[in-house]
Image: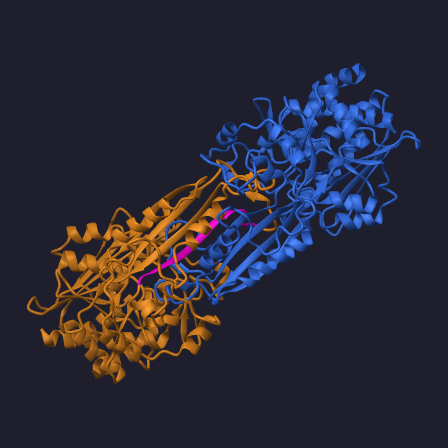
Chain colours: A blue, B orange
Amino acid sequence: MQAWKDYQEQHKDRFLNELLDLLRIPSVSARSEHKEDMLRCADAVKQRLLEAGADKAEIYPTAGHPIVYAEKNVDPSKPTILVYGHYDVQPPDPLELWHSGPFEPVIKDGKIFARGSCDDKGQFYMHVKALETLVNTGELPANVKFIIEGEEEIGSPNLATFVKANKELLKADVILISDTSMLSMENPSIDIGVRGLSYIEVEVTGPNRDLHSGVYGGAVANPATMLAKMIASCHDENNHITIPGFYDDVVEATPEERAKMAQAPYDEEEYKKDLGVDSLWGEKGYTTNERTGTRPTLEVNGIWGGYTGEGAKTVLPSKAYAKISCRLVPNQSSAKITEKVLNYFKSIAPAGVTVKAEEHHGGEPYMTPIDSDAYKAAEKAINATFGKDPIPVRGGGSIPICSLFEKELGLKIVFMGFGLDSDNLHSPNEKFDVFNFYKGIETIPYFHKFYAEMK
Amino acid sequence: MQAWKDYQEQHKDRFLNELLDLLRIPSVSARSEHKEDMLRCADAVKQRLLEAGADKAEIYPTAGHPIVYAEKNVDPSKPTILVYGHYDVQPPDPLELWHSGPFEPVIKDGKIFARGSCDDKGQFYMHVKALETLVNTGELPANVKFIIEGEEEIGSPNLATFVKANKELLKADVILISDTSMLSMENPSIDIGVRGLSYIEVEVTGPNRDLHSGVYGGAVANPATMLAKMIASCHDENNHITIPGFYDDVVEATPEERAKMAQAPYDEEEYKKDLGVDSLWGEKGYTTNERTGTRPTLEVNGIWGGYTGEGAKTVLPSKAYAKISCRLVPNQSSAKITEKVLNYFKSIAPAGVTVKAEEHHGGEPYMTPIDSDAYKAAEKAINATFGKDPIPVRGGGSIPICSLFEKELGLKIVFMGFGLDSDNLHSPNEKFDVFNFYKGIETIPYFHKFYAEMK
């Protein structure tokens, strides 16, 4: 649509600068010292939504970080699109690996480097600018609502309460989310599923104090060694997860889906080269795409214990810890798996140590029906701006709130992600291509258009 | 000897206060930020030796932290006793577990709480005050030399160079060291052996950056998981160490020695209660005393990798690390074992990760001949002040420089330790009983007397 193109061309520099301003706010939800930054960020998001043309935008406090809600109504007879995103980001550690400050965005080789550039500030902001485009060209074809939360990276602990209490406010026909990625700009794709999550922390306690490893070494169970043994026992020689009942509820992908997935472009050499590894790892009998999309996993996200400073300290530590998370697939239940993993670690605690294992947060896996109007509208929108139909793929990440929305609001979700797997989400030097940012802003209005036409 | 007793009784408060002053200097050799404190501490030790009556005391710079040397000569025809000690201390971490500041010594229930109170400031300082006693009562029976180094806790990397370059200066008849412990004040003991040490650090690298555990989890080897598997493989189900050739050179304790050791007082319930563990751990077929005295060990001193901060971060780490040390017994060689352990970790590196393993520092095991004059003099000295002969035991710790002294100076070493295993060496709340401190100052002069008489 020429009018959209012209408007966006005219304002593209401002669009980008507005995003950079948003990226300068260190909205790290996991860190209590950033509480003020979270409030600042929520307020900024609210202002931008109003500037973009929202009829109203409000900040809803929660027990944790606030939720930003906004809406723009055109006509009650038109469908309503509910856009979900999150303004919080992952902690930036390890800081020393960043080439530039995580909250001092820089543009290099056409890429925006900053924590949150892709996950998810850069992506939800495409929707804000798409709204502005549609409003200012007088072509908004549907009602739009925004729910931008501040706790996605810590498992959305307070979203359910908000959603349950505001079903009328959130009434809509479909939920649109840009918090996923595409295979590439040459091979546009749509995530039709996201994995669930189960996240626990394990604390292993041996002696009641750090001990001299010479005086006591060899006679007292070392919690770091015991933790290592416990973690080592979680995968067998085929890298299957050994936790009893872990795979009980897994729905295997159909031969058809596996065949379709096998067609998605994948260059193993490129994949290894990008990661700097000489060989890949994973569950025997499955391809890389299946391992990251259709199979559940168990990963150590962090481990620590004893002396980790400079030089050498001959200590037998009192405690050792690990953060461990599982990715889940249909029809695994986060609560069930969390319980199984917690019980497993407690049950295998070796003599001489005690194990405390607690839940961090979880989320259910989710699949999008590819025969829905929303999916078809997204497919058409991508075709309109990329010149080809998107490939349906299963994403490896998790968006825990999907099943919540479906359950509480009875709505289906369509994912239109414009990021790339190589965007270093949750890693140092997270980036988002300027090209992708603009491509998203260009594509989203078409979704509104086609979706409104189908209804 | 009444004169000694009177002198010590008269000056005991000053003796204690002088030690507290020394403990206030945070002489942590492993931490570069304490370089200045190390110099300050070396200078304080020098001054105290001069005040105690040394003819001369000097600070010898090294490539690392300086060595303090002092001597008091009475008569060339008399034997010379070389006292070794160290003024450096272990890092105080974890700080949050200390009940009072590690470098703000407090006396509670007759115990001196501070880092270094027992290891080794409190113990080498007993010799300084013993010298003062003998000098000021005009009864010094032998020549005395002091070598107090500042790098014992980091493996004495520069001591060998100094000793080799100063053989004449260090010429003596015996080396006396108080850097070990006693079973108890009721059961005085003498360590007749110390274990050797081999210390390595392992770095496991997976992908070239931290990854999103959802996008890549299940398809890329996780270095934390791989490190856990490697560590878990170091002990078999009987807690024997599995590293090829690890036990090759171990000299088994004789049935006689094992029988003698079995007589040493040991209350397993008390031992477990003190450590707060419900059961002990260790190599099958050996008692606790044997496990900590006559058997080699492998312990994880520290492990870290990935996200270890507050909350949850869904990251697949790029790197994971471990500090691992082995205690060695006669006739294991530190260099040989270090090589075996390094090679083991490199050899078992799973596909998908690379392993870098490097040496920290080491030391050889050492045994004292119990038929030597020096041992007999120590035995008599302890009998004189404790009213009973000491029990010969094998200590679990390491004093890497023993074999160096023997090799370079051709001297035997006798250990007169007055600490207790429960003194929290290398742990939070390190302590040294005031009673033991004074008992050492009371006992050491008798060693000088009896040793001089035997020669």
Image quarter for residue B69?
Answer: bottom left
Between residue A118 and residue A404, name the one nearer to us: A404
Could you say which is closer to the camera, residue A177 or residue A146? A177
Q: Position of residue B382 (x, y in %)?
A: 24, 79
Find residue B444 and report its image quarter. bottom left
Residue B304 sits inside the magenta stretch: yes
User: Is B168 rendered above or below residue B202?
Assistant: below
In this rendering, the answer to whether B108 lies above or below B171 is below
Query: Vertical placement of A308 versus B266: above or below?
Result: above
Looking at the figure, which quarter contains the N terminus of chain B? bottom left
Residue B57 percent coordinates (x, y)? 21, 59
For the record, the magenta segment spans B296-309
In x, y percent, where is residue A262?
Answer: 61, 31
Residue B171 within the magenta-colored segment of the rendering: no
Q: Is residue A355 visible?
A: yes
Residue at 46 percent across and 65 percent down: it is A209
